[in-house]
Amino acid sequence: MGEFFRHYVLHNLGLKLISLGLAVGLWLAVARDPAPAEVVVELPIEFHHVPDNLEISSESIPQAQIRVRGPETTVRRLQPSDIHAEINLSGVGPGERTFDLTSQQIHQPHGLEVVQVIPSQVRLTFDKRLTRQVEIHPRVIGSFAAGLKIGRIVVVPPTITISGPQKRVEVVEAAITDAIDVSGTMERGTFVTHAYVSDKRLPAETDLHGSE
């Protein structure tokens, strides 16, 4: 029995203890590293370096769906604002162009891996930027007392400046105001309202003073 113990147990005891330590260390490392988690985050695509004389005139721009993988604790804390999908538009001209969207254009927190990007390509239309002024047409509602009517409406300022893709700006005939309710008005009045154009892609809202 003693001979067996010395030959099989004590022989190369140091190496056996080292092997045991490595095995235990490896098991602990695996046990403490849980399986990675995945999540899909949907977010708007950011466009950088748009030439000053151009506008993106596409009717719709898709959202990016980014699938990331990483430690469960990191994935659980992830917010859409932590990830950015970026496309560089420097050097583009008017017309249509297709851009790749790959994991190289995704910026994510340290420790996370981008495993899928949808869409893989984005097609955009560009148009020259046009700025022009259009007249403001007031929109009046309500009823006056018997015998009264609108004599004259003065809008200050009389025009508004709009800017955007050339083809969209050129078809705008005028801006209109929010409804101005004159019910109960017995004499000259001043109203503060806003003006806008029907194309929601052309920002043109402003404060107006209208007198009647």
Image (spheres, rainbow, N blue to C red):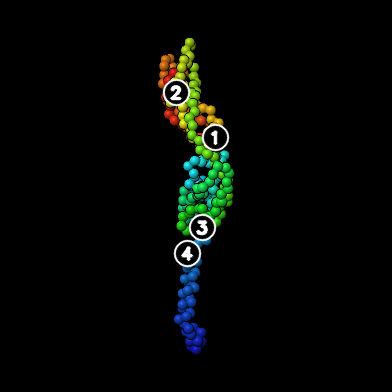
Mark 1 near mark 2, Cβ–Cβ under 8 Å? no
> For the C terminus, which image quadrant?
top left
Looking at the rendered structure, the secondary structure element under dot 2 is: strand
Q: Nearer the viewer, mark 2 or mark 4?
A: 2
Q: Earlier in the sequence, mark 4 or mark 3?
A: 4
For label 4, the residue is 32
| Residue lying at 56% horizontally and 51% vertically, measured from the top left | 100
Q: Amino acid at mark 1?
A: Arg
Nearer to me, 6 or 37: 37
Closer to the chain start, of discs 2 and 4, is 4
Residue 207 vertical placement versus 25 (above, below): above
Picture residue at 51% right of the left edge, 30% below the top: 197
Looking at this view, is 32 or 139 the one in front? 139
Dot 2 crowding, Cα within 10 Å, few <14, some 14–19, many 20+: some
The three-letter amino acid code for the residue at tag 2 is Val
Please tell me whether mark 4 sits on a helix, a strand or a loop: helix
Q: Which residue carries the number 1 mark?
A: 168
Q: CA distance from mark 1 to mark 3?
A: 41 Å
Q: Secondary structure at mark 1?
A: helix
Q: Which residue is mark 2?
A: 155
Residue 106 percent coordinates (x, y) = 50, 53
Q: CA distance from mark 4 to mark 3?
A: 20 Å
Foreground mark, 4 or 3, reads 3
Q: Earlier in the sequence, mark 1 or mark 2?
A: 2
